[in-house]
Image (cartoon, helix red, strand yellow):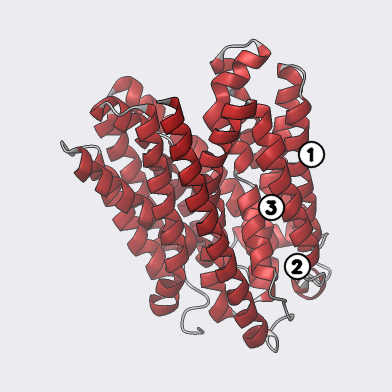
């Protein structure tokens, strides 16, 4: 049986490795198109620009996959309870929220490329530190550096798209970059599982997490242009407080931030709780339940990629509102289905529209305050991290007091609230310009 599992995992790894290779080729060809069509409107970018941003976003996920898959093994290594070990995620998330707020200041003082590279360096140092961690407290401190890296990489990758690509190219680019983050779950989870079977959880750091962090660092250094229109032209002599004032006095920008909190809270119904739902409700084994994660990640990735076309057709605001309503409807309904296959279909459909919603909402947020994209996307990163924490907490309380139906309903309604916020409070500054 163990040989069959190992063979199955190797097959899955080869399949996803090939998928990633094709995805990379698509990024390269997309980069070529951008360099030809955008050069006269924006800073010329090479064919590796978009690929470097996709890989950078990809690099933010494996360290989280590590604790998601191997929390029990790590706890056993350091001789602590799993609940105590799980606090490394809590501290990392808190640091990510706090540092994302601080990034608003850094983004008006330093070039976005510099901040992206420093963030990737933090992820690399965190991964190397976790590999050599000697006790729980060293693991806690070194893992928390990943929160700093994520808070720097995520907003800067999106801000760089607005900085270097023409308006009609941005929506698709945002979708591809966001897809890079979910692609890590498709590729990283099975590969890291195989590596852990051979050499333990530390082997996954040495064989996958650290190499990808270093590759992303190299690609960002080579592929992202050094110039920064946001830093040199748009900011001028304005201070961080002035940029913050411009954001908080913009009703649409505030609407985007609040909407991002609610939409990401709703996403926790799929990301955190759907797997345990299928295990408990339909008595799936952990191995089969892992396929649910892969299926949802695939749907989320594809949804993120195709969202760019929808945005260019109907606009950023309408795309965000419509996909939020659809994703929330399917989130509410999947927990009520008596059939495994029907519930799976609704869960995957929700993940698809969640990916589209994330891409469309990020595109909408990016255009709110063009002169201060770095600050705006940093605040958006803090908002989405806060939404994750709220969704996890609310979902947990719903399970304690009620059941999965209540969890899906409550978090699904939060998604509907996000759609209402986006509809009534936001505007699309770029509408009609693409």
**Which of 165 and 341 lies nearest the eye of the viewer?**
341
- Label 2: how many residues lie within 10 Å, few (<14), some (14-19) or many (20+)? many
Residue closest to the far front: 3
156 to 29, vertically: above or below: above
Q: Mark 3 points at which residue?
A: 153
- Is tag 2's residue or tag 3's residue first in the polypeptide sequence? 3
Helix, strand or loop status at disc 3: helix
**Which of 65 and 150 lies nearest the eye of the viewer?**
65
Q: Name the residue under label 1.
A: 125
Q: Can residue 389 be seen in this view?
A: yes
Query: Do the numbered discs 2 and 1 sit on residues whose CB atoms are within 8 Å?
Result: no
Which residue is at a point 24% across and 33% down the rendered structure image? 405
**What is the quadrant of the N terminus in the image?**
top left
Give the Cα distance between marks 3 and 1: 14 Å
Give the Cα distance between marks 2 and 1: 21 Å
- Is tag 3's residue or tag 1's residue first in the polypeptide sequence? 1
Q: Position of residue 309 (x, y in %)?
A: 43, 74
**Residue 86's quadrant in the figure?**
top right
Q: Where is residue 365 in the image (x, y as percent from the top left)?
A: 54, 63
Q: Position of residue 267 (x, y in %)?
A: 42, 45
Query: Do the numbered discs 2 and 3 sit on residues whose CB atoms are within 8 Å?
Result: no
- Label 1: how many residues lie within 10 Å, few (<14), some (14-19) or many (20+)? many
Q: Name the residue under label 2.
A: 224
Q: Is residue 250 visible?
A: no
Which residue is at a point 52% across and 57% down the rendered structure image? 18
- Is tag 2's residue or tag 1's residue first in the polypeptide sequence? 1
227 to 355, vertically: above or below: below
**Which of 195 and 273 lies nearest the eye of the viewer?**
195
Give the Cα distance between marks 2 and 3: 13 Å
55 to 431, vertically: above or below: above
């Amino acid at each position: 049986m163990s040989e069959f599992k190992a063979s199955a995992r190797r097959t899955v790894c080869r399949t996803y490795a090939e998928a990633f290779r094709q995805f990379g080729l698509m990024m390269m060809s997309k980069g070529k198109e951008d360099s030809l069509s955008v050069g006269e409107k924006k800073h010329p970018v090479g064919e590796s620009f978009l690929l470097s941003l996709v890989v950078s976003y990809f690099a933010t996920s494996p360290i989280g996959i590590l604790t998601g898959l191997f929390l029990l093994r790590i706890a056993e290594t350091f001789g602590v309870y799993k609940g105590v070990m799980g606090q490394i995620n809590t501290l990392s998330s808190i640091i990510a929220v706090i540092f994302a707020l601080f990034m608003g200041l850094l983004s008006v003082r330093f070039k976005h490329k510099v901040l992206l590279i420093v963030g990737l360096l933090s992820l690399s140092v965190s991964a190397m530190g976790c590999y050599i961690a000697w006790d729980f407290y060293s693991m806690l401190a070194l893992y928390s550096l990943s929160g700093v890296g994520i808070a720097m990489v995520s907003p800067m990758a999106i801000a760089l798209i607005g900085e270097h690509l023409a308006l009609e190219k941005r929506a698709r680019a945002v979708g591809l970059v966001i897809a890079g983050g979910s692609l890590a779950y498709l590729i990283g989870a099975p590969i890291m599982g195989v590596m852990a079977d051979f050499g333990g959880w530390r082997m996954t750091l040495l064989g996958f997490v650290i190499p990808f962090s270093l590759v992303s660092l190299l690609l960002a250094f080579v592929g992202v242009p050094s110039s920064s229109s946001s830093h040199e032209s748009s900011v001028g002599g304005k201070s961080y407080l002035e940029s913050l004032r411009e954001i908080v006095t913009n009703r649409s920008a505030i609407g985007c931030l609040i909407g991002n909190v609610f939409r990401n809270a709703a996403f926790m119904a799929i990301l955190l709780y759907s797997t345990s739902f299928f295990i408990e409700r339909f008595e799936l084994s952990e191995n089969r339940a892992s396929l649910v994660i892969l299926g949802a990640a695939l749907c989320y990735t594809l949804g993120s990629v195709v969202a760019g076309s929808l945005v260019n057709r109907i606009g950023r605001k309408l795309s965000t509102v419509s996909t939020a309503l659809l994703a929330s409807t399917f989130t509410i309904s999947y927990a009520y289905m008596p059939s495994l296959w029907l519930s799976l279909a609704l869960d995957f459909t929700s993940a698809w529209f969640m990916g589209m919603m994330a891409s469309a909402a990020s595109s909408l947020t990016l255009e709110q305050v063009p002169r201060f994209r770095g600050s705006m996307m940093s605040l958006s990163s803090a908002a989405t991290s806060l939404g994750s924490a709220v969704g996890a907490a609310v979902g947990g309380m719903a399970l304690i007091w009620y059941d999965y139906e209540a969890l899906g309903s409550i978090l699904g309604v939060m998604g509907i609230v996000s759609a209402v916020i986006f509809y009534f409070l936001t505007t699309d500054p770029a509408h009609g310009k693409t």
